Amino acid sequence: MNKITKKALSVLFAAIFIPVLANCAYSDIYIDSQETDTDYVIENSRVLIPVRSIFEKMGYDVDYDEYTKTAYIFGDKVITIRSGETGFYCDGKWVECDQSQKTIDGRFYIPLRKITEALDDYSVEWNEKTKSVYITRGADNKNTEEIRTSAEKNEPDNSELEKRVFELVNEERAKNGLSELKWSDELAGFAREHSKDMAERNYFGHTDPQGVTFVDRINEANIRYSYCAENVAAGSTTAEGVMEQWLGSSGHRANILSSETEYIGVGLCYDADSDYGYYWTQCFIKN
């Protein structure tokens, strides 16, 4: 959150934000077109699968050593997975993951993308409409791309999420007896550029690594204003989630409920290789 008036030409507030890094959801897994009774977990935008139930359904034998917290998977290949490590062994070769194996509700989970890349005779596809994972034996191996969720590939229509934030902002303003804000395509484009910059250069804040501030950016974009403010957030995967974060911070909430604001733009960008994945920016102005 950063706020300035054209007359004062001074930053009134600094950003205050505690990022939420983990987001979990549950849905269906299909093996050779057969629905299983097993759900996957999405955490930090990575699909995690329960080791025993999935691999046994794929025809593998699974042993688990409780003392060492290690799973052994035997089939066409031998896979060794230890809880808490950021990778696993496949036929004696170490495979590095970008997220550690973990235990959730007493079940041992591993990132789907890496484990299926190690299985040459399987392909994995993601159905965005049903939020389901399809694992198929004998199909062309498309693991590297297909097993990512649409969010990992930045495929969702971010404009729908951005407009949902816009709706939620006006709902909150209505609850507080304030006028509705108007959507600005110019501000939305400006906000998206900052979210994209944070995601691609892997930083978080109103000021970039070269010291360029919010005020510098909005002036460089030649956006006319008498009042302007900015909220940024990272880590949340939904419009409702990011609004909850902003409304839980007094400074960010003040920007959303400011009586001085007339226009709003919202920008979202996702980058699977960044620290937080999802980067959100709200910009507010009065002409």
Image: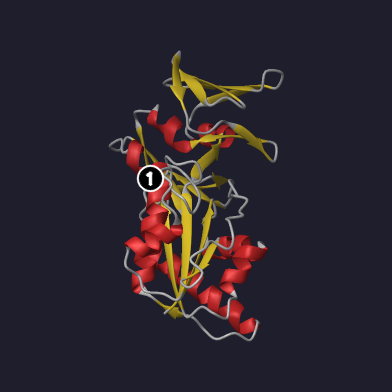
What is the residue that sits farthest to the left in this orientation?
Answer: 140
In the image: residue 199, left or right of residue 85: left
Total label count? 1
Q: Position of residue 113 (x, y in %)?
A: 43, 36
Q: Quadrant of the C terminus?
A: bottom left
Residue 157 visible to an observer of this rendering? no
Quadrant position of residue 202? top left
Whether 117 is drawn above or below 253: the answer is above
Residue occupying image coordinates x 38% and y 45%:
200
Residue occupying image coordinates x 48% and y 32%:
98
The residue to which callout 1 is attached is: 200
Front residue (pair 76, 112) = 112
Residue 207 visible to an observer of this rendering? yes
Whether 169 is drawn above or below 248: the answer is below
Q: Position of residue 246 (x, y in %)?
A: 60, 63
In the image: residue 27, left or right of residue 208: right
- Colouring mode (rainbow / by chain / secondary structure / one colour): secondary structure
Front residue (pair 69, 217) = 217
Mark 1 closeness class: few <14, some 14–19, many ≥20 residues within 10 Å: some
Q: Position of residue 201 (x, y in %)?
A: 39, 43
Residue occupying image coordinates x 47% and y 44%:
203
Q: Position of residue 229 (x, y in %)?
A: 50, 67
What is the residue that sits farthest to the top in this orientation?
Answer: 92
Front residue (pair 273, 7) = 7
Whether 180 is drawn above or below 108: the answer is below
Whether 185 is drawn above or below 271: the answer is below
Q: Quadrant of the N terminus?
A: bottom right
